[in-house]
Amino acid sequence: MINKPPINVQDGFFYQLRKDNTLVDVVLLSERTRLGRIKRFDKYALVLDVDGREEMIYKHAIASVSPAVVARPAAPPPVPAPAS
């Protein structure tokens, strides 16, 4: 039997978000939300770039991490065709 290392879902998820420079929402257990980009992470913490400042957040304080939903401006209304 081949010994495979356990799959670490966190590492793959954080790596992809960092590689793609994705804006993420980090919700803390205190219900505070931090919006930024993941710069680094390890077994215990992640470093988030928030408005040009780096913040270290311990993983045990995180409730959830998800790609941020960026609101897009509404499309302009269609222009009516000229009457003939």
Image (cartoon, grey):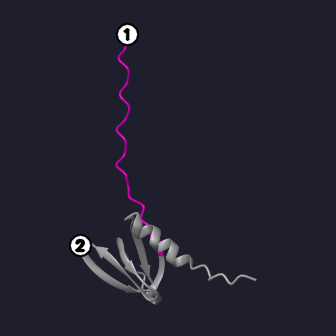
List the residue tagged with mark 1.
Answer: 84
Q: In which quarter of the image is residue 52?
A: bottom left
Instruction: Report the front residue among 78 and 57.
Output: 57
Q: Magenta includes 76? A: yes
- Amino acid at pointer 1: Ser
Say which element carries label 1: loop
Cα distance between the residues tagged 2 and 1 = 55 Å
**Residue 64 location in percent, x, y?**
49, 77
Which quarter of the rendered picture does the C terminus lie within?
top left
Question: 43 left or right of 38?
Answer: right
> Which labelled disc corresponds to residue 28?
none
| Magenta residue span | 65-84
The residue under label 2 is 52
* Residue 14 position in % (x across, y down): 46, 74
| Front of the two marks 2 and 1 | 2
**Name of the residue lying farthest toward the front:** 2
Look at the picture and state if 4 lies above or below 82. Answer: below
The percent position of residue 24, horizontal first and vertical second, equals 40, 69
Please tell me whether the stretch drawn in magenta is mainly helix, strand or loop: loop
Lateral position of residue 10 relative to residue 32, left or right: right
Total marks in image:
2
Residue 62 shown in magenta:
no
Q: Where, by quadrant of the figure, is residue 32 drawn?
A: bottom left
Which residue does the image show at 57% across and 79% down from the upper left?
8
> Quick one: which residue is furthest to the top in this view?
84
